[in-house]
Image (spheres, helix red, strand yellow):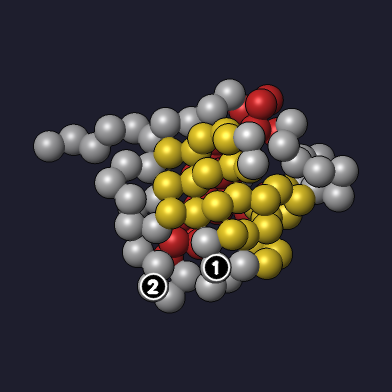
């Protein structure tokens, strides 16, 4: 059975959530059934299939957020929250 493509928001709406210092706060749910990025009032919710084991969910979240914004994964880095669901990412747009 084929996997359903990830549900992604509009790239410009997601980019609007980046603060002036280039940081984006996200809440990651590892081990989800479907991959998705969604916008909520209190932040950005990221669901990834990868388990929370040895940084796999962090890496998957970075790749998914980068894809949602139309960027290379190397333009998104983890600043804080390596072992937490609440993470702070640095996004380089230029």
Residue 36: give x, y in percent of width and height.
43, 39
- The N terminus, quarter of image: top left
Residue found at the far bottom of this picture = 54
Left or right: 1 as drawn, with respect to 24:
left
Left or right: 78 as drawn, with respect to 57:
right
User: Can the viewer see residue 70?
Assistant: no
- Label 1: which residue? 84
The residue drawn where x is 49% and y is 46% is: 46
In the rendered image of this protein, does residue 79 appear above or below residue 63? Answer: below
Residue 67: image tag? none
The residue drawn where x is 73% and y is 54% is: 90
Tell me the crowding category of disc 2: few under 14, some 14 to 19, or many 20 or more residues within 10 angstroms, Cα based. Answer: few
- The C terminus, quarter of image: top right
Camera-side residue of 66 and 85: 85
- Label 2: which residue? 53
The residues tagged by marks 1 and 2 sit, at their Cα atoms, a distance apart of 12 Å
Local secondary structure at mark 2: loop
Local secondary structure at mark 1: loop
Residue 57: give x, y in percent of width and height.
44, 61
Residue found at the far right of this picture = 20
Camera-side residue of 51 and 86: 86
The residue drawn where x is 60% and y is 50% is: 26
Tell me the crowding category of disc 1: few under 14, some 14 to 19, or many 20 or more residues within 10 angstroms, Cα based. Answer: few
Disc tally is 2
Mark earlier in primary sequence (1, 2): 2
* CB-based contact (under 8 Å), mark 1 and mark 2: no
Q: Nearer the viewer, mark 1 or mark 2?
A: 1
In the rendered image of this protein, does residue 4 appear above or below residue 80? Answer: above
Residue 15: give x, y in percent of width and height.
70, 33
Res 74 → quadrant? bottom right
Residue 56: give x, y in percent of width and height.
42, 65
């Amino acid at each position: 059975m084929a996997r359903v493509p990830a549900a992604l928001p509009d790239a410009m709406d997601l980019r609007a959530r980046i603060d002036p210092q280039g940081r984006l706060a996200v809440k990651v749910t590892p081990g989800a059934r479907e991959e998705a990025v969604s916008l909520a009032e209190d932040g950005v919710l990221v669901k990834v299939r990868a388990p929370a084991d040895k940084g796999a969910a962090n890496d998957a979240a970075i790749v998914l957020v980068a894809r949602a914004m139309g960027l290379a994964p190397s333009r998104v880095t983890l600043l804080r929250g390596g072992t937490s669901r609440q993470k702070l990412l640095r996004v380089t747009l230029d």
